[in-house]
Image (tube, helix red, strand yellow):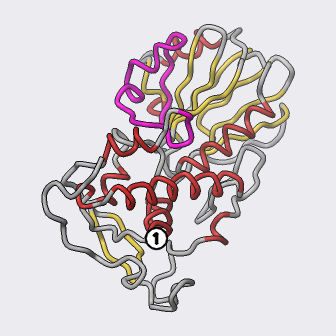
């Protein structure tokens, strides 16, 4: 947390708040947040005088596009951005502040201190860590059923951890995998290679639908997530599966169960998502 819908919501909010603002100076109060370059003074110097052209997203990462540099920011569990006027009281756990020439400030706050920032020459960030190994973007036009099927369809891995693997598909975290698998009627322990073409198509549509609805709702607020304007998400009110252990399934009334798969708590309905045995070799039609 936050996952793709939350990061996308933050991106859209920041695009309303910081586009066209020019950095006068940067203050880094917790050096370990800055992963690259290692020289904090160089990080601050490079951004001085740079103007934010846009804020983009790659998976769960924000990309602040400046004139000559790209700042890659990962919010991790508790990271958040907010825009303030100069002189407004600074909250605890504010670790990085971008002071703009118009008298406003972009502040990065992170209670858990797990967030990271990397600064690269413009567009070089896509060829460097942490972005270079990321997989398909599920809200991108290139995310077609064929691309989805080719990426995961023949793998002998349980479908839930496979969908969580950012090297295959990015941004679908624990919440949205549970919701997508339920919508598709697929048990989270099914091997990807056991899924028929029809089941893969249902899962593809479920992933796209779930993420789009979550983005439209402003993401999900489970603990502390807020967007750049301090507003909470509302998709948690639409959960069919996640966090509903022992509650009745909305579709069939069966009690929702929870298990651990790959170290992640997993919610599912045993009746709506039956665990089927692997089909015989060659059963997957392409």
| Residue closest to the far left | 281
- Left or right: where 112 falls relative to 12: left
Dot 1 lies on which element? helix
Left-right relation of 67 to 201: right
Query: Within 10 angstroms of label 1, few (less than 14), some, or many (20 or more) residues?
Result: many
Tell whether 275 sits left or right of 12: left
The percent position of residue 121, horizontal first and vertical second, equals 51, 10
Q: What stretch is highlighted in magenta?
A: 116-141
Task: Provide the residue designation for mark 1.
Answer: 182
> Closest to the observer: 176 or 187?
187
Q: Main secondary structure of the magenta part?
A: loop
> Which quadrant would residue 87 be assigned to in this image?
top right
- Residue 117 among magenta residues: yes
Q: At which x and y percent is residue 125?
A: 46, 19
Q: Residue at x 47, y 51 (%)?
A: 172
Residue 101 at x, y = what percent?
Answer: 82, 17
Q: Which residue is drawn at 34% across and 30% down?
A: 133
Quadrant assignment, res 86: top right
Q: Residue at x 55, y 51 (%)?
A: 208
Report the side of 3 relative to 167 (left or right): right
- Residue in view at x 42 percent, y 80 percent: 272
Residue 43 covered by magenta stretch: no
In the rendered view, tell whether residue 72 sits above or below residue 193.
above
């Amino acid at each position: 947390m936050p996952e793709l819908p939350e990061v996308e919501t933050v991106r859209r909010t920041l695009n309303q708040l910081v586009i066209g603002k020019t950095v006068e100076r940067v203050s880094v109060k917790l050096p370990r947040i800055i992963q690259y370059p290692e020289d904090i003074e160089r990080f601050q110097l490079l951004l001085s005088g740079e103007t934010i052209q846009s804020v983009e997203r790659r998976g769960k990462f924000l990309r602040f596009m400046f004139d000559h540099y790209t700042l890659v920011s990962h919010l991790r569990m508790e990271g958040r951005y907010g825009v303030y006027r100069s002189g407004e009281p600074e909250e605890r756990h504010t670790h990085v502040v971008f002071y703009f020439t118009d008298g406003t400030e972009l502040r990065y706050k992170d209670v858990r201190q797990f967030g990271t920032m990397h600064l690269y020459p413009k567009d070089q960030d896509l060829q460097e860590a942490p972005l270079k190994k990321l997989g398909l973007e599920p809200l991108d036009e290139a995310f077609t059923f064929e691309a989805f099927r080719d990426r995961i369809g023949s793998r002998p891995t349980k479908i839930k951890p496979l969908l969580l693997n950012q090297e295959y598909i990015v941004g679908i975290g624990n919440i949205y995998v549970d919701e997508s698998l339920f919508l598709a009627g697929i048990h989270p322990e099914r091997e990807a290679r056991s899924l028929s073409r029809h089941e893969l198509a249902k899962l593809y549509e479920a992933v796209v639908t779930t993420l789009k609805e979550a983005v439209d709702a402003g993401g999900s607020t489970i603990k502390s997530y807020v967007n750049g304007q301090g507003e909470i998400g509302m998709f948690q009110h639409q959960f069919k599966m996640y966090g509903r252990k022992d509650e009745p399934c909305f579709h069939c009334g069966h009690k929702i169960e929870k298990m651990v798969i790959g170290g992640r708590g997993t919610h599912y309905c045993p009746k709506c998502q039956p665990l089927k045995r692997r089909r015989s070799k060659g059963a997957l039609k392409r």
